[in-house]
Amino acid sequence: MSAPELNSVPIPARIQTIRQLTADTSLFRLQLDDDKAFPFIPGQFIQLSVPGGGEVPISPADLPAEDGTMELCVRRFGHVTSLLHQSRVGDRLGIRGPLGNGFPVDEMAGKDVLLLAGGLGIAPLRSLLFHLLRHRSDIRSLTLMYGAREPAVMLFKDELLDLAATGSLRLLLTVDFLSDTGQEEPACNVGLLPTLLKGVRLESSLSCAAVCGPPALYRCTIDELLQAGVAGDDIYLSLERRMKCGVGICCHCAIGQLFCCCDGPVFRYRDIKDIPGAL
Ligand SMILES: Cc1cc2nc3c(=O)[nH]c(=O)nc-3n(C[C@H](O)[C@H](O)[C@H](O)COP(=O)(O)OP(=O)(O)OC[C@H]3O[C@@H](n4cnc5c(N)ncnc54)[C@H](O)[C@@H]3O)c2cc1C
């Protein structure tokens, strides 16, 4: 078999800024050494290499920028992401990609688009949100439903409220529970994310939904989406699996006959609903 030419050499980059968002999650702005735009579709991912650690799959949280910058919203999780969180401005990293398929943004034209983000799932959906806002006149309506465990871990809240204030986006926020302080969160519903969908009616042929979050979110959201009127073909799920190569060779991320890295990470519900263990 010939060696895959696809995105196998990391592009060098350095950390330009680090903004801590919560106790374990930061927004890293990278500057690619070649100062050129790094093209990708929202929902695609990169393999980020951290020197001395290894590679991890991360989805860019913004849009491709002409000046070669890229924002990554990363939670400290294990070995590599902890090393990244110890990094400082100016430190060097590598970027391999773009990898995977991304969200089918062209199919969203003319539709009522629902974005459903749970927890860190807001990171790739922020990129899709920015894309849809840039092409807002192409779609009928745009709604973002975002659920976090508690107010302290809700990411990008002020930014999202500012965007919603422009009128181009309907924003519904929810938290699983309020913090012990009992502090009110006026802009937030309290309850699990699917509760936001209860009672919503959508026109089947004109609606689509992009979902990203922990596995439990998919299981409880899909029924609500189907009941609300979204067709299984038009529910796009961004799945997470352990990955190594990112290009369909190592088989670490198999989902039945499919690979999360190169057939996904975005899948239509219709295509994976019958694969055991997919959801
Ligand atoms: C398509 C995709 C996009 C992602 N986007 C983001 C993002 O924007 N922000 C973010 O914080 N996290 C994201 N993740 C999850 C992130 O890749 C894991 O948290 C990270 O790989 C954990 O690595 P670690 O070395 O810190 O942890 P360890 O547990 O020490 O990881 C060991 C190895 O297992 C693999 N691995 C572990 N957990 C995962 C996982 N959940 N998914 C895939 N591989 C894993 C990695 O290859 C890693 O080298 C994404 C995952 C995928 C698949």
Image (spheres, helix red, strand yellow):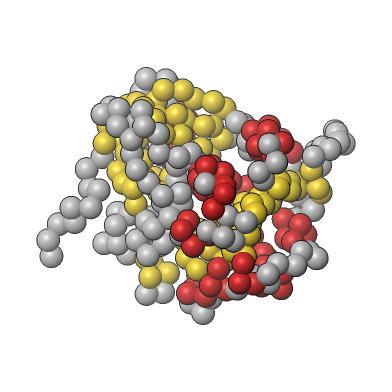
- Classify the position of the N terminus by image quarter: bottom left
Q: Residue furthest left?
A: 2
Residue 236 spot, x, y in % from top left = 53, 63
> Looking at this view, is 76 or 17 the one in front?
17
Residue 23 spot, x, y in % from top left = 62, 31
Horizontal side, residue 61 vs residue 80: left or right: right
The vertical placement of 4 against 61, above or below, is below
Q: Residue furthest bottom?
A: 274
> Looking at this view, is 131 or 86 the one in front?
131
What residue is rendered at 45% in x and 46% in y?
59
Horizontal side, residue 18 vs residue 1: left or right: right
> Looking at this view, is 257 or 138 the one in front?
138
Horizontal side, residue 177 vs residue 158: left or right: right
Residue 37 spot, x, y in % from top left = 33, 35
What residue is rendered at 68% in x and 33% in y?
162
Residue 48 spot, x, y in % from top left = 36, 40
What residue is rendered at 70% in x and 41% in y?
167
Q: Is residue 217 visible?
A: yes
> Looking at this view, is 97 or 214 the one in front?
97
Count of labels in the image = 0
- Classify the position of the C terminus by image quarter: bottom right
The vertical placement of 40 against 276, above or below, is above
Horizontal side, residue 48 vs residue 185: left or right: left
Q: Is residue 148 visible?
A: no
The vertical placement of 208 against 130, above or below, is below
What residue is rendered at 22% in x and 48% in y?
8
Q: Quadrant of residue 66?
A: top left
The vertical placement of 54 against 254, above or below, is above
